[in-house]
Amino acid sequence: MRGGRGRCTRPGFRPGCGPPGIIDAGYRGDIGVVLINHGPKPFEIQAGDRIAQLLIMPYTPLTPVGRPLDTTDRGDNGFGSTGKN
């Protein structure tokens, strides 16, 4: 979900969700947009105003190909765990 559409591009008014959000492929609930008015005056949004964009992208699950990966010295640890005693 991205902001920056039509009426919401004026200074002091922007979506409150920060960077663009990603909605998981299996999500089945409602989707909404949080807007924050940082300006000094009230700002009214009318039905039909363009306030955000929804970009739908194809989702293709990855299918493992080839042999399983070999074990490493890292074991079950994560980032930054190599080189530690």
Image (cartoon, rainbow, N blue to C red):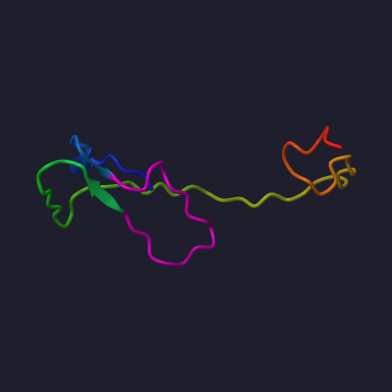
Which residue shows up at 36% across the image and 48% down it?
17
The quadrant of the rendering that contains the C terminus is top right
- Horizontally, residue 65 falls left or right of residue 27, namely right
Total numbered labels: 0
- Horizontally, residue 72 falls left or right of residue 16, namely right
Residue 33 at x, y = what percent? 32, 54
Give the quarter of the image for residue 9: top left
Give 30 or 17, whichever is nearer the viewer: 17
Q: Is residue 37 magenta?
A: no
Task: Identify the main secondary structure in magenta.
Answer: loop
Which residue shows up at 18% across the image and 50% down it?
49
Q: Is residue 23 magenta?
A: yes
Give 11 or 8, whichever is nearer the viewer: 11
Residue 2 at x, y = what percent? 36, 44
Identity of the residue furthest to the top in this view: 83
Residue 61 at x, y = what percent? 65, 52
Which residue shows up at 48% across the image and 47% down it?
57
Identity of the residue furthest to the front in this view: 85
Residue 1 at x, y = what percent? 38, 48
Identity of the residue furthest to the bottom in this view: 29
Q: Is residue 1 above or below residue 31?
A: above
Q: Which residues are magenta?
A: 15-33
Which residue shows up at 16% across the image and 57% down it?
47
